Image (cartoon, grey):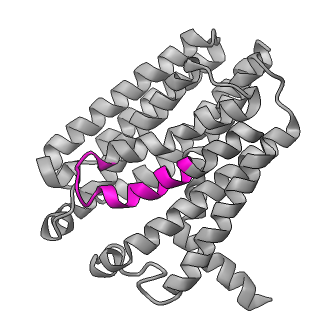
């Protein structure tokens, strides 16, 4: 039993399962907003959670496989599970296949349209792993593929698509791209030596931080549009105020000549931001059902 627990924990560390909190609250928020068209059934919410966990686990596992050699060469990532031999490539492949199947099965439980879209979504998620090999827009592409989750959750609940939810997707896309730029600043020298593409490697840290701030400004604008499009109330606005303050803190914590606080900003502040969004949407729907 102890060996199985340790193996599960190793897989969890490989995919950084705790980071699911970044995008999951956006998907749940979209499901709650979709109640304006269709009541949210408990089973739909359950399968949305399963689908999110499956898709993210499969995507992160695939990323670790694709980047195994790069991770081994990078001092920051050399202690990850595949480079250190704690997990083999074949075991990681089996993991990806298993969670891909779980994602597609959960999508099927949410309806035919969700099932038909599940394979293209997986391919988009997997393709991100190669973008940094040819374009410094890889951060924006990461934001794009992750931003599909609110639209997917909307479709899962409403069984149809509405352009309105794209504002929440836009908020997630620009927010994700912004903090991925901040995170990539840690690997500027490594990326340049290995001919990898990123905004910090292309433009330098100073300009990268400015670009990240612009993305986060665009994210706040999209959050505000969600307020208007869905006719939300004061609870949501308070949540947006908190998120705005947190984004300012996050961007001010990362300085061009001092990147020591990047992990804290990435792992902790961003988790609080996504949970604050969910709290704002939930509180608004309780006050103004």
Q: Is residue 140 above or below residue 76?
A: above
Q: Is residue 8 above or below residue 57?
A: below
In-image side of 44 versus 230 (left or right): right
157 or 76, which is in the foreground?
Answer: 157
Q: Does 259 lie within the magenta span?
A: no
**Residue 3's x, y, as percent?**
72, 90
Residue 202 in sight: yes
Residue at the image position 78 percent from the left and 41 percent from the top: 110
Residue 261 in sight: no
Residue at the image position 72 percent from the left and 47 percent from the top: 107
32 or 48, which is in the foreground?
Answer: 48
Q: Quadrant of the C terminus?
A: top right
280 or 225, which is in the foreground?
Answer: 225
Find residue 29 and report its image quarter. top right
**Residue 105's x, y, as percent?**
75, 55
Residue at the image position 69 percent from the left and 54 percent from the top: 104
256 or 39, which is in the foreground?
Answer: 39
Find residue 232 and report its image quarter. top right
**Residue 11's x, y, as percent?**
60, 75
In-image side of 141 versus 21 (left or right): left
Q: Is residue 288 above or below residue 167?
A: above
Which contiguous range is marked in magenta?
120-138
In-image side of 133 versus 264 (left or right): left
Q: Magenta residues: mostly which secondary structure?
A: helix
Q: Quadrant of the N terminus?
A: bottom right
Residue at the image position 22 percent from the left and 49 percent from the top: 136
Q: Is residue 96 above or below residue 55?
A: below
**Residue 135's x, y, as percent?**
23, 51
């Amino acid at each position: 039993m102890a060996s199985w627990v340790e193996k599960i924990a190793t897989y969890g560390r490989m995919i950084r399962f705790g980071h699911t909190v970044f995008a999951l609250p956006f998907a749940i928020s979209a499901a709650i907003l979709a109640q304006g068209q269709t009541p949210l059934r408990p089973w739909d919410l359950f399968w949305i959670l399963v689908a999110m966990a499956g898709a993210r686990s499969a995507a992160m596992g695939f990323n670790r496989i694709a980047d195994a050699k790069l991770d081994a060469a990078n001092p920051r990532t050399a202690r990850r599970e595949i480079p250190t031999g704690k997990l083999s490539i074949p075991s990681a492949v089996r993991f990806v296949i298993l969670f891909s199947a779980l994602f597609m099965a959960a999508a099927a439980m949410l309806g035919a349209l969700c099932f038909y879209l599940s394979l293209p979504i997986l391919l988009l998620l997997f393709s991100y792993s190669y973008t940094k090999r040819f374009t410094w827009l890889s951060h924006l592409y990461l934001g794009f593929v992750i931003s599909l989750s609110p639209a997917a959750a909307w479709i899962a609940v409403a069984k149809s698509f509405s352009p309105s939810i794209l504002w929440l997707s836009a908020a997630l896309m620009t927010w994700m791209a912004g903090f991925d730029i901040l995170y990539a600043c840690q690997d500027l020298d490594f990326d340049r030596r290995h001919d990898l593409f990123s905004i910090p490697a292309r433009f330098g840290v100073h300009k990268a931080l400015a670009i990240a701030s612009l993305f986060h400004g665009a994210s706040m604008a999209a959050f505000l549009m969600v307020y208007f499009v869905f006719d939300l109330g004061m609870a949501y606005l308070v949540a947006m105020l908190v998120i705005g303050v947190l984004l300012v803190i996050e961007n001010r914590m990362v300085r061009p000549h001092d990147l020591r606080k990047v992990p804290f900003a990435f792992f902790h502040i961003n988790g609080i931001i996504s949970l604050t969004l969910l709290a704002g949407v939930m509180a608004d729907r309780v006050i103004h059902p």
